[in-house]
Amino acid sequence: MDIALKLLLVVFSIGLITVVLLQHGKSAGLAGAISGGAEHLFGKTKARGLDLFLQRATVVLGAGFMILSIVVTVLSK
């Protein structure tokens, strides 16, 4: 069981890295980070299609990675 969970953790981590690298950068630099965050907060830029899928996949894989990390740590003690 321990080995299966660790293999699943590796799959989640590789998937998370891949999904993050496939996403396009929204803005560049500090000024872009501030204005890009404001646009995202107030809904001026809506994600569609592939961007929306990658955004949701990042959330799912990130949450799964965190949960699996905690489970593997607790079970390995």
Image (cartoon, rainbow, N blue to C red):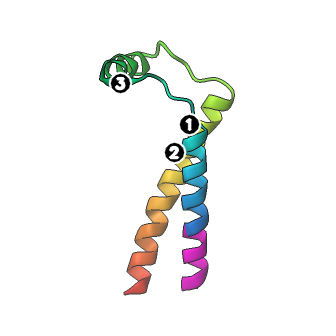
Which mark identifies residue 29?
3
* Residue 8 painted magenta: yes
Please state which amino acid type lies under the numbered disc 1: Gln
Above or below 30: residue 4:
below
CB within 8 Å, label 2 to label 1: yes
The spot of residue 30 in percent (x, y) is 30, 24
Q: Give the residue pinned by disc 2.
A: 59
Please state which amino acid type lies under the numbered disc 2: Val
Q: Give the residue pinned by disc 1.
A: 55
Q: Secondary structure at mark 2?
A: helix
| Image quarter (top left, top right, bottom left or bottom right) of the N terminus | bottom right
Density class for disc 2 (Cα within 10 Å; few <14, some 14-19, many ≥20) is: few
Please state which amino acid type lies under the numbered disc 3: Gly
Foreground mark, 3 or 1, reads 3
Q: Secondary structure at mark 1?
A: helix
The spot of residue 9 in percent (x, y) is 54, 68
Mark toward the start of the polypeptide (3 vs 1): 3
Mark toward the start of the polypeptide (2 vs 3): 3
The spot of residue 44 in percent (x, y) is 47, 12
Foreground mark, 2 or 3, reads 3
The spot of residue 13 in percent (x, y) is 54, 60
Between marks 2 and 1, how big is the CA–CA gap? 7 Å
Q: Secondary structure at mark 3?
A: helix
Q: Image quadrant of residue 35?
A: top left
Q: Residue furthest right?
A: 49
Between marks 2 and 3, how big is the CA–CA gap? 24 Å
Above or below 52: residue 27:
above
